[in-house]
Amino acid sequence: MLTSEQDNFVKMFERSFRDNWDLEAITDYGTANTLTYGRLAAQIARLHLLFKLFGIKKDDKIAVMGRNNCNWVTTYLATVTYGAVIVPILQDFKANDAQHIINHSESKLLFITDLIWENMDLEQLETLKAVYSLANFKLIAHRHHKEITWGDVEEAFSKKYTKGFTPESVEYEKRPNSAIGSINYTSGTTGFSKGVIMPLNGLAGNIRLAFNLKLVYPGCRHVAFLPLAHAYGCAFDFLACLASGGHSWLIGRTPSPKILLQAFAEVKPTTILSVPLILEKIYKKMIVPQIQKPPIRWVLKVPYLDEVVLSKIRQQLVEAFGGEFKQIIIGGAPLNPEVESFLHRIKFPMTVGYGMTECAPLISFTPYEEGGKLYSCGRALDGLMEIKIIHPNEEGIGEVVTRGENVMTGYFKNEQATKDSFTKDGWLRTGDLGIIDKDGYLFIKGRCKTMLLGPSGQNIYPEEIEAKLNNMPYVLESLILQTEDARLVALVCPDYNEVDASGLTKEQLEEHMEEIRKQVNAELAAYEQLNCIKLFPHEFEKTPKKSIKRFLYTNVEV
């Protein structure tokens, strides 16, 4: 447990607000709405008064659901500094799922985007006292003896702070790091969501890591395009950034590569967090067309000449991301090996980390400047986390388990799931298969639940086959399934823009897929061979961190 005054989660933010009072803290990207640390602290104080008017007590739950914006951040920080528990709900959850989470978590207040609220019903939300808009904190629904509007809050604020709101006004009651900070409902690829009980210690652990590695510092700049309701973006683009005196630009729109590249050019971030899909799309659209030109392909085979071309590509890519970042940290899903290999070849400042919601999220990571190893996701966080492999096979591959400062307490109101998630000696089971080399570097091979068995019991990792397929022409994404008689079938969603640009008919596309199947099989072991490729008409449904929801396709007829 992190017990020092410097590592107390609530006091971290009290200090940051006081020390960085006049610095800019958060901006709704694309708007003029920017809050300094002082203005953010004042808004938090207003919400504290709102909570008091409703009789919110310590450890009561407050839910927030919507796209990234300044009021989302304010709601989160106001909740945890008040002593309540924040329940961040991913904006991509369906209304029925969100209502279930609100009821299951016993939330007393809800802050939500107006459009999302239109699909919900207060009568079905048994524990809620009121609902407020994330657009402007306007009261939009209530079941209370009296309407408590934002006007009531402003009146209470004026009465309490008669001499104005100053840095000395920011004083939060110290909560031990063992107290519950959040309940995050997972958006997993294998089934129903569970409420991860995260103590403040786990949140503080990730912030401490960011401090120690100088990923954040006063004046650092972040572009927060990952959903803040997800642990990855929340930990670093939001919590660590603001605890350090940095400035975070919040993107509330769908983060297409075009929007992101524009934001990077304007903000010039100092550290970038991304999921693989974003980098893979930029690689496919920006780099692949260059390196596939016959003259460039020839030059890349010539020693010394290749370095000139690769250096120019590297510089072009660095400038596309704003030109001032120290490293891009990839997490949330495996990075395509071909993309990683090329970026490693051009010495692009990028590193891959590993984590999960149950660890708030980081488990392993090695900074770019320390070198790292190709295809690994770093070493266990020094002084914070431990990892080991249990039940390894003859190749040393087994389930990754972890323990340390960032680990959850358990799943909310789900004792059985909590029990199943830990070994008898207290290690958290990640559900991932991996191997640790002699230097302590972790290499992830796949999910325990997705691993397939070959005809003679060989382990087959579908993610590795999918990575090869996804590099092929006309393939947007793929999913490997296994039939009852152990044959492997690939569902492929074509890249229709590429198909249309080439003028291919359906029959010609199917012929290309057969050629692709043969090419991929040439790189696979006999027990991994693809029996056929079947075209899938649209993109696969994904979690907010852009991992395919595999459980939705287990019954697809192949």
Image: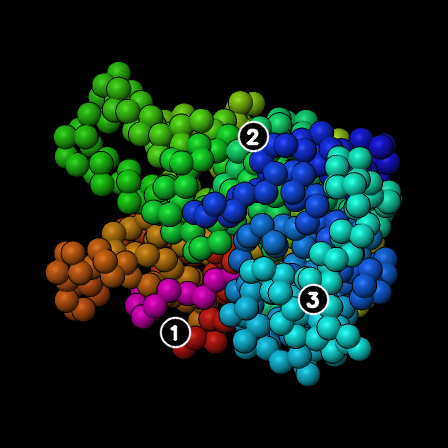
Quadrant occupied by the C terminus: bottom left
Helix, strand or loop for disc 3: loop
Name which of mark 2 and mark 1 comes first in the sequence: 2
Residue denoted by label 2: 220
Q: Is residue 43 left or right of residue 8?
A: left
Residue denoted by label 1: 558
* Residue 400 at x, y percent in the picture: 66, 47
| Mark 3: amino acid | Thr
Helix, strand or loop for disc 2: loop
| Mark 2: amino acid | Cys
Q: Is residue 73 magenta?
A: no
From the viewer's perspective, is residue 220 above or below residue 463? above
Q: Is residue 373 visible?
A: no
Q: Residue furthest bottom?
A: 123
**Numbered mark located on residue 149 in the image:** 3
Residue at x 37% of width, y 64% of height:
539
Q: Nearer the viewer, mark 2 or mark 3?
A: 3
Chain part drawn in magenta? 531-543
Q: Is residue 533 magenta?
A: yes
The CA span between labels 2 and 3 is 36 Å
* Residue 526 at x, y percent in the picture: 39, 54
The CA span between labels 2 and 1 is 50 Å
Q: Nearer the viewer, mark 2 or mark 1?
A: 2
Number of labels in the image equals: 3
Question: Counting other residues with Cα less than 10 Å from the Cα at mark 3, is it few (<14), some (14-19), or many (20 or more)?
Answer: some
